[in-house]
Amino acid sequence: MSIDDQISGARPTSNGRAQAPNRVRIRTTPLPAAIGTPAATESAAESHVHIAPDAVFEADDVGIFYGSKQALIDVTMRIRRGQVTALIGPSGCGKTTFLRSLNRMNDSVPSFRIEGQVRYHGHDIYGAGVDTVEVRRRIGMVFQKPNPFPKSIFDNVAWAPKNLGLRSGLKERVEKALRGAALWDEVKDRLKDSALGLSGGQQQRLCIARAIAIEPDVLLLDEPASALDPIATGAIEDLIHTLKGRFTIVIVTHNMQQAARVADRTAFFSLETRGEKPIGTLIEFDETERIFGAPRDPRTRDYVTGRFG
Amino acid sequence: MSVFRRRAQEDFDPTQPLVATGNLGRRHVVSRVIQSIAVAAAVAAVAVLVIVIWAVVSHGAKAITWDFVTSGYPTGVGPYLVGTAEVVAIATLMAMPIGVLIALFLSEYAGRRWTRPVQLVLDVMNGLPSIIIAVFIYILIVAATKQQSGLAAAIALAIIEVPLIARGTQEVLRLVPEAQREAAAALGVARWRGILTIILPAAAGGIVTATLLSVARAAGETAPMLLLNSLAKGDAVQLNPLKEVPNVPVRIFQLSEEANPEGFTEAWGLSLILIAIILALGLGSRALLNRSKRKLTR
Amino acid sequence: MSATPPAGTASLQLARSNRQSPARKRVDRFGDLALFVICAAAALLALLVIVLIAKEVIEGAQPAISRFGLEFITNSEWAPPLEQFGGKGVILGTLITSAMALFIGGPVAISIGIFLALLAPVSVRNVISPLVEMLAAIPSVILGFWGLLILGPVLVNTIEPFLHDTLGFIPLFGAPQTTGNSVFNAGLILTIMVIPIIASVSRDLFMAVPRDLQDGAAALGSTRWEVIRGVVLPTTLSGMTAACLLGLGRALGEAIAVAQVIGGATESHLSLFKPGGTMASLIALQFPSAVSKLHTASLYYLAALLLVIGIASNLLASWVGQRFGGAAGATR
């Protein structure tokens, strides 16, 4: 992935966030630490390297281990701001594992170990002194199976903002999130009803609303439509289009047509036999049209042509 | 709307270092305090356990001699040990078949209709205070025959043991794969043969475990003994259950109610023996349970 | 075994059953029936025992019920030689000690459950869990003995004077006695007994909360406590209530340990540090040496009251557990 790609491939983004001028400037000096604790300043200085202006994530030679078993190897990629990046590939090749390591959700797996670096806006996510809760506040996630809380619809969306202390304008915030998830019209009259009474597709949109209510920087979607019927799937895909500018989206999907429909860039993961065992790795990462139209790697070509239709 | 968005943005610049922003610092403090409280509670519980066991061991160890364990009142406690073993054995002999049969009923015969009521009966039985069971047996037997006896106490202990054995057996029966029952039926084996020769043996480990645990519980029950079987002197072994049988819990209770410090030493010694037996039963049954669970779910 | 078409199976079975002798078939039919009858009889026996217990205890209490009626509950004079029996003192003692056990032991036990299920690594849990359960295995007579000889003196020398000096204006914290036999001691012993029960059930409840629900909360940038408070506790509320009711039942019915440490008094008072009595402990202490028929009947009256409260809390626990579903997910 060369420098020209970043400059030429960057699309003009239209969300309010990217327009703020100080976001696009390349920093070459360390940021003044926001909190001013010594650890923060040090790690900020260390981990803040020259970054491309619109790269949100940078994975550098990332390898992931569960105990002694290696699940992922040699992943190096840059995920850009404001775009939708899809991770596709056969099952078991590590794409969900990689996604979950972007917001440290793999920490709860006891034998999890990561090598290489994952940088978010230049900061090493797994660095010393990193606050995991803060990471997840900025990088939200929606899971494969809808998992709404057994609370009312309103309380589901309002829960995280309340934790963050964003209590003023709560009702407006909930409405905005539900509108953003294309769910408002369906639930506006029954916000006090239990979220468990919604259909599967509605529950998943509720989970999306819940995630965007705190206005994260990034949304990670782990096969968000795989548990849903085709109509609900279509609704989710439309949703991704509308959310695209506001958030940087990384989506794992086993459905190639879905990737082709929603993603700006697509990463193809697959299993590669290194030594004895097959290990998941990144095969190719490019513009979606290129991956599906004219893939460079024969393995990519086999995968995308084999499964089409 | 854009004013609103900018305000939230001001709280939160995603390119800042990944340290706590906004109110997260305070929230972390709260979370850590609560976690410390939880840890402290667990430590306190273990501490109490250690303190009590340490007290029993340190005060009771000095009383344990060969003479102590084998002779009778006033120098030893042998008859109490034998008596408790006898009464608990009789109780368990009565309780085990009944408990297993009830569990079989619940797992093999009770349909939707009967499961809840029978389960409720078991739960209520389990929750009956042992003093009430003791009073009941007193009315039924002791008041009628004007005679305390080990047998009366054994019946009371059996009532205490039945729900424990039933519940433990139920859990193991649940683990027996449905496939085994179906296989037996498919082979044309009669239901009763299938239950007795295939299902029960598969659950045997769990049944033994449940029985051991209920024995551990019954050995320490004092209230039934106090009301129904407390008049034995303890100078000689009494094997006839129709008479008063000396037993350990009542002896400890009596010694604790007298103000005699020498008696206290005997009580500590008895307590040590009783706790040691109960812990051994507990550990043994736990090991057995793990083994039988592994066999069933292989 | 080859796959045979349905018709073939039927003939196979027919052939097999023809091979079975008619005598064996009769035995089998009888065996099936017999086993069912035996099992059902066992279940019925259990029900019979409970009904019989209720009947006998209430009948035994009749003389006292007809003599004192409901005044038994409000009258606090308990004087066997005078044939005066009022249960208010011990009823109050029961309420105070059980309340102590529940309101101190409940939160502590739930905290232990949180620790074991949600905070501790598996290796720690596998060590501490059995230790907590071991606390429940200690016979009450030994715990009471320990409370009498060890806890009592400690309380009298340290905690009771401290509480009396600082909070003595509240009648609850009156002047301590010298013996260490007090309502407070009994309450603490009951707390120790109740904690492992509630802690084990809570731990199982918390472990059953689905992982994906907790992950969902964590992915929204919440602290550990916020996940527990927002997801784990609300979904297990009914189960925890049932667990606390079970613990309460245990505290209400404990006779022996309480009898050893509470001092055997029957007067009605509110001071934690004076000797007192509970219904169960009074029965244990006075039953073997009751002086008159009315005395015994009054003790049966207490037993009947205890039975009613005990069964009620048990039924309530079952109902709460049934009605509000299991640990995973609240059904509104």
Image (cartoon, coloured by chain):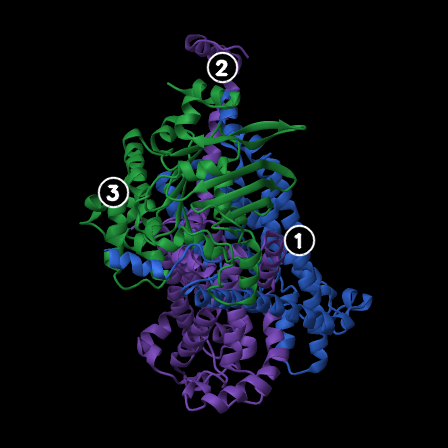
The alpha-carbon separation of the residues under discs 1 and 2 comes to 48 Å
Q: Kindly identify the amino acid type of the residue bearing the numbered disc 3.
A: Ala
Colour chain A is painted in: green
The alpha-carbon separation of the residues under discs 1 and 3 comes to 58 Å
- Height in image: B223 above or below C89? above
Q: Position of residue A116 (x, y in %)?
A: 60, 44
The chain containing the residue under callout 1 comes to B
Q: Residue at x 78, y 68 (%)?
A: B64
Q: Residue at x 46, y 53 (%)?
A: A135
Viewer-nearest of labels 1 and 2? 1
Viewer-nearest of labels 2 and 3? 3
From this viewpoint, which residue is outermost toward the right? Answer: B66
Q: Kindly identify the amino acid type of the residue bearing the numbered disc 2.
A: Ser
- Height in image: C65 above or below C181? above
Q: Position of residue B275 (x, y in %)?
A: 67, 63
Looking at the rendered structure, the secondary structure element under dot 1 is helix
Quadrant of the snapshot with the C terminus of chain B: top right
Q: Are marks 1 and 3 on the same chain?
A: no
The answer to whether residue B205 is left or right of residue C114 is: right
Q: Which residue is mark 2?
A: C17
* Label 1: few (<14), some (14–19) or many (≥20) C-alpha neighbours in 10 Å: some
Which of A82 and B213 lies nearest the eye of the viewer?
A82
* Letter of the chain shown purple in the rendering: C
Q: Which residue is mark 3?
A: A182
Q: Which residue is mark 1?
A: B283
* Label 2: few (<14), some (14–19) or many (≥20) C-alpha neighbours in 10 Å: few
Q: Residue at x 24, y 44 (%)?
A: A183
> Residue C100's image quarter?
bottom left
